[in-house]
Image (tube, rainbow, N blue to C red):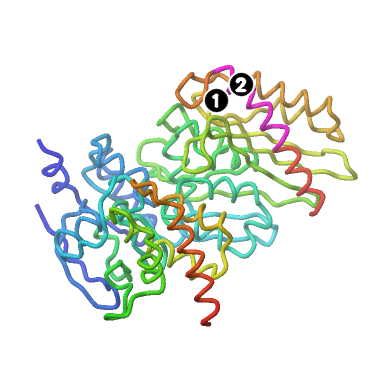
Amino acid sequence: MSKLHVTTTINGEEVEFLCTPAQTVLDVLRNTLGLTGSKEGCGTGDCGACSITLDGRLVCSCLVLAPEIRGRKVGTIEGMAQGDRLHPLQQKFLEMAALQCGICTPGFLIAARSLLEQNPDPSETEVRYWLAGNLCRCTGYDKIVRAVLETAADMRGAA
Amino acid sequence: MTAEMTMTDIRFLAPETLDDAISAYAAAQGAARILAGGTDLLVQMRNGVARPGVIIDIKGIGELTDIAEGADGSFTLGAAVSGAVLGEHPRFGTVWPGVLEAINLIGSTQVQGRASAGGNLCNASPAGDSVPAMVAAGAVVTVQGPKGRRQLAVEAFPAGPGRTNLAPGEIVVSFTLPPRPPGSGDAYLRMIPRTEMDIAVVGVGVNLTLADGVVTAARVGLGAVAPTVLLVADAGRALVGSRLEDAAVDAAAAACRAACNPIDDKRGTIAYRVRAAGVLLRRSVAIAAERAGRN
């Protein structure tokens, strides 16, 4: 069995790791690199709990092979806050209690940030469709959607 | 053997040329799988349906990731272009809104970041959303293998659920969509029991060209109601020469219903699927005609 050596950039920092050819990015993040913020819900791309960005594009890390991220830029939930300063979405999720058990929260935050980067003024329908690939097993969708809409409004006001 | 042990025996290749990819694919003698977006392959590997010895990532090959508009107005779409990238193309969605909508219906935002029309075709699900729209568009798929390159109509590609007419060693390279005459429009609609994130019960793609209100060309692709996606030639014939009067659209809807050979499953009964095929034909025709009027 041969391990592959991969150099990539995760949350702005160059990272090296060894992986097997069929290991997923999610597996490497959690079990090799100790970045356990990305969660494994289904492992088949249905739940979005493992959402990351790959060269800025939203993907499920369970559906990306680790060798594929060689030379790419990965963004995970661990890179969302700047030091102690939470991203406005994280702050709003706390203020509005837009989480219950929390397993889906990192994925929702990464997906919502990706939405607001593309569309700073989404309608509720646009938020719901964009986040349709993120499942909340506690079914707390309404607060999540409201938090995303309120964050978008705040960020537009601050801009 | 455990799944873990199987996984570690796999080799990962990321060729930069199509020739290298085809050589590696042929050399693996059926043990290799092509990786584009991976949204089907990784799921199949996880549940043990696919146990490849070699994984060949084709996304480093220019021809498989390019979107090119020809001087004649045709489009050539690399097989591995993701739905998200296609959606950001400045022209494609204007010229082929129905094809784009169909591709963008595949999976979630996350899946759109990876999934491709080439993968959707190769997965060969009867319910693949991009396929009926591609069939309606008259798209031609270019494949290449050890014996060279050939082209076939998209409707000639699937052989049955999960099976294709690719010869051993052949890889899907690209789709070519023909030039658009003035007065053309396309549309794709699917029926699903939920609002989002589901598999089509019926999918209908319609592509029309009108001149002075008369249909001069019409193609209809029908999905999820037979072992493969179908070109419903009778439905197209029923529309050509008409002004989309009720009688012509009724005849096209009847042709769609007649073409259905669906299964009963939890998403829909045979009777429901057959009836819905006619309904979606009407609605897709209306959207395609409205778009044709604007072009």
Q: With respect to residue A11, does B169 lie above or below?
A: above
**Residue under the point 38% across and 59% down:** A98
Q: Secondary structure at mark 2?
A: helix
Our reading of the magenta stretch's main secondary structure is helix
In-image side of B174 versus B26 (left or right): right
In-image side of A136 versus B197 (left or right): left
Task: For mark 2, name the chain.
Answer: B
In-image side of A158 versus B146 (left or right): right
Tell me where residue B45 appears, x and y as whole percent: 26, 41
Task: For mark 1, name the chain.
Answer: B
Q: Which mark is residue B274?
A: 2
**Label pair 1/2, CB-CB below 8 angstroms:** yes
Question: Mark 2 packing: few (<14 Cα in 10 Å), some, or many (20+)?
Answer: many
Tell me where residue B47 appears, x and y as whole percent: 25, 37
Residues B18 and B92: in front is B92
**Does residue B280 belong to the magenta stretch?**
yes
Q: Which residues are magenta?
A: B270-283
Residue for badge 1? B225
Q: Which mark is residue B242?
A: none
